[in-house]
Image: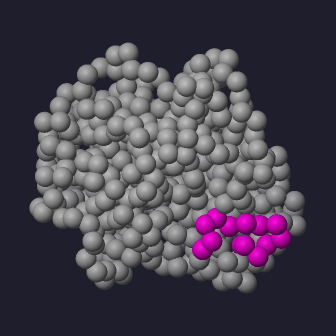
């Protein structure tokens, strides 16, 4: 089975585009030229000198990144269970990081700055922000050690530039006619990729973007011209990994339907007291452990937003692998939303790039803003070719990855002191927690690579509680050959080095 068709599902209970077009925001209110940021209130960072709330260790869940101390808002802005906004937190908070892991808008942190989690798997997962990249010596040591490994469990063997270029040349031969001329400002192979994505998602059109961050900012901007407010999870990518670009560049604000480490429920969406323009749902929610709702939960949450007349945008960077847990095809999932962002380097292994899909008017507006944001590149054929090759190579394999992730997670959960989140995994990625400092686990990982030629895990992150760390495990092609016995033996060798 491939992602393009999905598991033979029943038709979704959500509305169809043709039958409910009137329930969507109209172009005149949705994509009107928004005003500048103006004097909009800044919800956070909190004003300097704001008192800090003590960290209640009893409230720290095993199954999510450790909460941090959060700025306590002024008394007039205290949140209640039905009034969760980015002014404050109710029983939960954003992630706590060591000072050297913080990602701030200026070189030195200021009180109230929102911390951002450094990806746990810098080599095999998302790119790490430039100011959070490990020292050159450690980075080079990791790269060299992993390249010498004979076997890989999480992720894939890192490639040098020569190998990457050779692989693209080989894969591209089957993905596109290389006798065609290179693209110029989005035509040719880039346009072919856009049409391929639109077809997979069952949407009228799609626009290529050089980065997912740019695609997300453009999507949220298009949908937020009235109230200038987005409803999204505090663990979502725009909150955690984009330096609050939605606020700094566009003047938007956010409201949080929930702070629980999961997607919001329908009732939580109905309970949002503030006006907002668009509900953004990240599928899966990476920072909570790559978690997904059930199909019924997802459709109910979307319906709650529709009842309020709000648009729905999907952060589908990892949507490709979500079809198996949700039990519905890519097009059926995309049908629930007004716009969908997808990534070409996450899961698919492309060089870079993303796409934003939606109706013809939305995509036309997105292309205008892409140009304004500096995303109208002269040529992007290497990224487009690698994306097409990734679609051909990885989509047919994803179901096997997801199935084997459940096997691997069950084995790893049996290790002494280990916890897996979620259990079982919802996709081919999940968190593995161990009660050791991150630097100790990283050193053991490098020693295992150096001494036994096994690339077992990626980088470890210690998000708050001392001596409690997690890594993101990614089950891909290299891991499919590992039996439960081999996983147990390699993990035991790893623990023996601690």
- Toward which corner of the image does residue 350 lie, by quadrant? bottom left
Magenta range is 412-424
Given residues 351 and 301, the one toward you in this image is 301
In the rendered view, tell whether residue 401 sits above or below residue 129: below
Is the C terminus in the top left, top right, bottom left or bottom right quadrant?
A: bottom right
The residue nearer to you, when weighing 110 against 257, is 257
Front-most of residues 449 and 86: 86
Task: Point out residue 339 in the picture as x, y percentages from the top left corner.
Answer: 27, 51
Count of residue discs: 0
Measuring 48% from the left and 57% from the top, which residue is drawn there?
A: 263
Relative vertical location of residue 251 with respect to residue 315 in this rendering, above or below:
above
Q: How is the image coloured?
A: one colour
Query: Residue 298, image x and y in percent?
Result: 39, 64
Report x, y in % for residue 185. Answer: 20, 38
Residue 64 shows in the view: yes
Q: Residue at x 42, y 44 (%)?
A: 272
The secondary structure that dominates the magenta segment is loop
Q: Is residue 243 left or right of residue 6?
A: right
Q: Is residue 96 left or right of residue 174?
A: right
Where is 271 relative to 284, above or below? above
- Which sits in the foreground, 75 or 393? 75
Who's the residue at 70% across and 36% down the image?
Answer: 69
Residue in the picture at 30% in, 32% down: 227
Q: Is residue 422 magenta?
A: yes
Direction from residue 159 to residue 34 in the image, left or right: left
Q: Where residue 407 sits in the image (x, y, percent)? A: 62, 80
The reply, left or right, for residue 263 in relation to residue 47 is left
Quadrant for the N terminus in the image: bottom left
Query: Residue 96's quadrant in the figure?
Result: top right
Look at the image and say whether residue 374 sits in the magenta stretch: no
């Amino acid at each position: 089975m491939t992602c393009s068709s999905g598991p033979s599902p029943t038709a979704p209970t959500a509305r169809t585009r043709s039958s409910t077009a009137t329930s969507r925001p109209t172009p005149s209110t949705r994509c009107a030229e928004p005003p500048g940021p103006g004097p909009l209130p800044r919800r956070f960072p909190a004003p300097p000198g704001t008192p800090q709330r003590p960290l209640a260790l009893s409230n720290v869940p095993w199954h999510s990144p450790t909460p941090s101390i959060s700025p306590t808002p002024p008394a007039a802005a205290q949140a209640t269970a039905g009034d969760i906004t980015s002014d404050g937190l109710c029983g939960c908070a954003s992630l706590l990081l060591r000072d050297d892991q913080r990602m701030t808008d200026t070189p030195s942190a200021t009180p109230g700055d929102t911390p951002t989690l450094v990806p746990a798997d810098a080599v095999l997962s998302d790119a790490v922000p430039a100011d959070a990249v490990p020292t050159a010596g450690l980075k080079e040591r990791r790269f060299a050690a992993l390249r010498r490994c004979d076997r890989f469990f999480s992720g894939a063997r890192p490639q040098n530039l020569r190998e990457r270029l050779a692989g693209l040349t080989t894969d591209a031969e089957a993905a596109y006619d290389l006798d065609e001329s290179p693209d110029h400002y989005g035509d040719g192979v880039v346009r072919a990729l856009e049409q391929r994505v639109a077809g997979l998602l069952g949407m009228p059109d799609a626009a290529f973007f050089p980065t997912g961050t740019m695609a997300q900012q453009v999507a949220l901007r298009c949908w937020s011209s009235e109230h200038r407010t987005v409803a999204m999870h505090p663990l979502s990518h725009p909150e955690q990994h984009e330096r609050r670009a939605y606020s700094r560049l566009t003047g938007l604000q956010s409201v949080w339907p929930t702070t629980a480490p999961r997607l919001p429920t329908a009732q939580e969406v109905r309970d949002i007291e503030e006006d907002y323009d668009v509900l953004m749902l990240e599928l899966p929610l990476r920072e909570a452990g790559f978690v997904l709702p059930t199909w019924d939960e997802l459709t109910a949450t979307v319906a709650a937003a529709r009842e309020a007349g709000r648009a729905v945008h999907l952060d589908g960077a990892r949507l490709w692998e979500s079809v198996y847990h949700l039990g519905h095809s890519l097009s059926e999932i995309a049908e629930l939303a007004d716009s969908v962002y997808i990534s070409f380097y996450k899961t698919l292994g492309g060089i870079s790039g993303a796409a934003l899909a939606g109706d013809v008017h939305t995509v036309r507006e997105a292309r205008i803003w892409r140009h304004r944001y500096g995303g109208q590149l002269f040529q992007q054929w290497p990224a487009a070719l690698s994306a097409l090759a990734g679609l051909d190579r990885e989509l047919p394999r994803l179901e096997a990855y997801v199935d084997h992730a459940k096997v691997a997670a069950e084995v790893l959960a049996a290790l002494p002191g280990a916890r897996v989140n979620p259990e079982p995994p919802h996709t081919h990625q999940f968190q593995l927690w161990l009660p050791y400092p991150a630097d100790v686990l990283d050193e053991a990982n490098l020693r295992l690579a150096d001494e036994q030629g096994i690339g077992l895990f990626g980088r470890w992150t210690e998000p708050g509680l001392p001596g409690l760390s997690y890594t993101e495990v990614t089950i891909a092609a290299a891991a499919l050959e590992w039996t439960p016995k081999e996983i147990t033996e390699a993990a035991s060798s790893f623990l023996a080095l601690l």
